[in-house]
Image (cartoon, grey):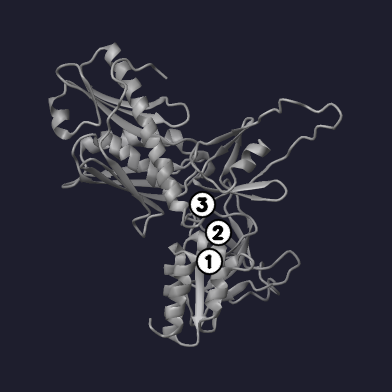
Amino acid sequence: MFSGLKDKVGEVLLPGDEFSLETEDTISLTERVKPEKVVCGPGLRRSGDRLLVCKSGVLRHKQPNMFWMDSQQRRYVPAKGETIIGIVTVKSGDVFKVDFGGSEQASLSYLAFEGATKRNRPNVQVGDLVFSQFVVANRDMEPELVCVDSSGRANGMGVFGGGGLLFTVSLGLARRLLSPHSEVLSDLQTLFPCELVVGMNGRLWVRSSSVQQTLVIANLLQSCDTMTAPQRQELFRRAAQGAL
Amino acid sequence: MMEVCGSSNVTLREFGSEQSLLSRPDGSASFIQGDTSVLAAAYGPAEVKVSKEIYDRATLEVLIQPKVGLPGVRERAQEQCVRETCEASLLLSLHPRSSLTLILQLIHDDGSLLSCFLNAACVALMDAGLPMSRLFCGVTCAIDADGQIITDPTAAQEKESRALMTFAIDATERRVMMSSTRGSFSVHELQQCIAVSQKASEKIFQFYRDSVRRRYSKTL
């Protein structure tokens, strides 16, 4: 199965494509036969002794044995450990309800902020933007968010957002912006200086020195989603020259 | 897979599809078979009303909008066929207490309407990134007065036929997932139509693969 999967890395696969466990025809008598372990990422599921593709996309591989489907999607499904931008909708007692664009609202405890105690409550109002990460996110339970990391420090998370603009893009673009050595980010740095917060739920927040520049950056990011690299660099070049 | 007796070339009208053409839904597709044209939009997994939520799987809702007027009994029957096929192929247990909505808008009807709805639904669900265990397609067969089997009939051919059958065929084993028939036909004719539909589905699945490949070719 490992060799079958490796052959298809980089190819476009459809839901329903299967990889079955193939036993080798010749088994070596002298070497020990090691059981091969394959780690399935998003888009791949195990059904019995087969591996089933459940989303259409490109098969990707990371050493030593991780495989996943790289697909284009707009709707976010929460996963533990991912950082997102949420909007506080309800403040009830000890818990805030945060909307992050998923199938239900996540809960954020008021104690999950840096330096928050029962006497020292954080200053969070309904309608505020929070940058937080999921600590509980599976299909059976209500998702839970926190604004501290495991050692109790904020680490960039918490309430933010005066004077900026929040907009949505596809999940793929958000992931591309967050990947190391991101091309989109380096192209963006050639334009005006700005503050950018990227949520893995496809929400971006931008603030620049003037409202016009903020709007230009927001429009550029929304439109460069479906462009190839040369088209995007051309678009950014035109924006930098002031043509847009 | 059954044997096809008689002529083995199956003719389908020219078909085409486009993905991600609408900006608001999570997934959208248009599917055109000859002159029949349908637009599909998929939303999900999204919030669900407490009265409609199911504790261990997603709630799938299919809405068919006709070209003029409000949906009637005919649209409700077609919705049920599409919904049953989609529920059999989606992995609903991955999103309990969520709702998946599929809206199918009729643009033009020139025969083979239910199979066009099924094809558009499958492409829209794939485009939305909803987890599916298998793909499906729809094929319509008509038996005319002489007993000839016509695949993908036009509206005029449907009107003159003595039997009309639509099958939803799955991609992995080419089995029939859903069938909707009207008219009178013998058991042998039914089996022949199923065999012909299974053969025709291969072209449609190859087309799905090519269109998804073209869509991802920019990022490769």
* Residue occupied by mark 3: A71
Residue plotted at (47% across, 64% down): A228
The disc, 1 or 3, on the residue closer to the chain's N-terminal end is 3
- Amino acid type, residue under disc 2 in the picture: Ala
Residue B84 seen from this side: no
Query: Which residue is labeled 1 in the image?
Result: A86
Query: Which disc, if any, is residue A59?
Result: none
Mark 3 falls within which chain?
Answer: A
How many neighbours does mark 1 have within 10 angstroms: few (below 14), some (14-19), or many (20 or more)?
Answer: many
Position of residue A241 in the picture relative to residue A31 (left or right): left
Pointer 1 and pointer 3 on the same chain: yes
Could you tell me how far apart the alpha carbons at marks 1 and 3 are, in whole angstroms? 23 Å
Q: Which residue is at a point 51% across and 73% down the rendered structure image? A: A205
In depth, the one of A97 and B99 nearer the eye is: B99
In the rendered view, tell whether residue B54 sits above or below residue B215: above
Mark 2 sits on what residue?
Answer: A106
Q: Are marks 2 and 3 in contact (CB under 8 Å)?
A: no
Dot 2, how many residues are within 10 Å of its Cα: few (below 14), some (14-19), or many (20+)? many
Q: Are marks 2 and 1 in contact (CB under 8 Å)?
A: yes
Residue B204: name its quadrant. Answer: top left
Q: Nearer the viewer, residue A59 or A51?
A: A59
| Residue located at (43% from left, 52% from top) | B215
Closest to the camera, between mark 2 and mark 3, is 3
Percent coordinates x, y for residue B199 in the rendering: 36, 26
Q: Earlier in the sequence, mark 2 or mark 1?
A: 1
